[in-house]
Amino acid sequence: MLSAPRAFSFQELAGLQDSLLDLLWASPPTWKSTIASNLLIFLVGSPILVSGLSTSGIGAAFLLGVLTWRAFWWPGFLLVASYFVVGTVATKLKITQKEALGVAEKRRGRRGPGSVIGSSAAGCVCAFLSICGIGGPSFAGLWQLGFVASFCTKLSDTVSSEIGKAYGKTAYLVTTFKVVPRGTEGAVSVEGTIAGFLASILLASIGYFLGEIDVPQAAICVLASQIANFGESLIGAALQEKEGFRWLNNDAVNVINISIGSILAVLMQQLMLQS
């Protein structure tokens, strides 16, 4: 005869709760605490995630979340979450109008794994370098700065592009300043450029308040992001998907863009320290 299941006492439940909290908030984070925290966050946040990511995109984002939490704990994770929310909102703005013009992201703005990787490759490299302790403690701050700069660069790019497509009155090709249709590769608009600049300031400020970077580093992130985005526009106008450069699709250009922003920020920081 089967016995009735034993009821847990209040002390046992409290102990279980404490053990779970200790696991989730282990400092410094371990791989076990990192995976557990991400599983919980992705489960609770799934309604938000599915609005901006495809199923495979969520899988890629989970890997990004694991690397981020393990390297930079919850402040780094919250920075990436802020990037995702602001970028998704910008992408969804006037989505029907964008679709009618043929310039909207696929799946009504729900981004796939290629977009996630293209947006986070540089940040993942910085997280990996930090986890492995490459360069020792003296380089830890540089990897953290490069991480923040990469997402400032990508958010600025995303917002400038999406706001330009939604509200830009006139788009100019960055290489010739010729007026072109909204959504043209390498095109910029006044409205989009201003919005992208403000977005980089916003995310850099979030990074500062989360303790990821200081004020001079926040300024470096903003400056590096604007230089990188100008370079990305030049690449888009001159090379992207042109003859001999068919491999240079939007995801590849994104990787180049965020890598430039991240590397520039690290180099600027080094120059400041030397001077």
Image: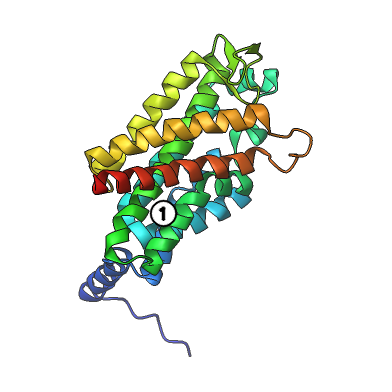
Judging depth in this view, the residue of 120 and 19 nearest the camera is: 120
Tell me: residue 71, above or below residue 114.
below
Tell me: residue 232, above or below residue 181.
below
Tell me: residue 163, above or below residue 67.
above
Looking at the picture, which amino acid does disc 1 mark? Ile
Q: Quadrant of residue 181?
A: top right
Judging depth in this view, the residue of 65 and 24 nearest the camera is: 65
Q: Is residue 254 left or right of residue 222?
A: right
Judging depth in this view, the residue of 199 and 32 nearest the camera is: 199
Please, which residue is most extreme toward the left here? 11
Q: Residue 223's spot in the image, x, y percent?
A: 37, 32
Please, which residue is most extreme toward the bottom here? 1
Task: Bin the neighbour count of mark 1 within 10 Å (Cα to Cα): few under 14, some 14-19, many 20 and up.
Answer: few
Please, which residue is most extreme toward the right here? 243
Residue 211 can be seen in this image: no
Residue 102 can be seen in this image: yes
Q: What element carries label 1?
A: helix
Q: Quadrant of residue 188?
A: top right
For the point 54% across and 28% down, the residue is: 92
Judging depth in this view, the residue of 147 and 39 nearest the camera is: 147
**Residue beneath label 1, please?**
41
Image quadrant occupied by the C terminus: top left
Q: In this view, does 234 lie to the left or right of 99?
A: left
For the point 30% across and 42% down, the residue is: 207
Q: Residue 32's spot in the image, x, y percent?
A: 39, 71
Q: Residue 21's spot in the image, x, y percent?
A: 28, 65
Q: Residue 260's spot in the image, x, y percent?
A: 49, 42
For the point 68% across and 18% down, the residue is: 101
Q: What is the count of numbered marks?
A: 1
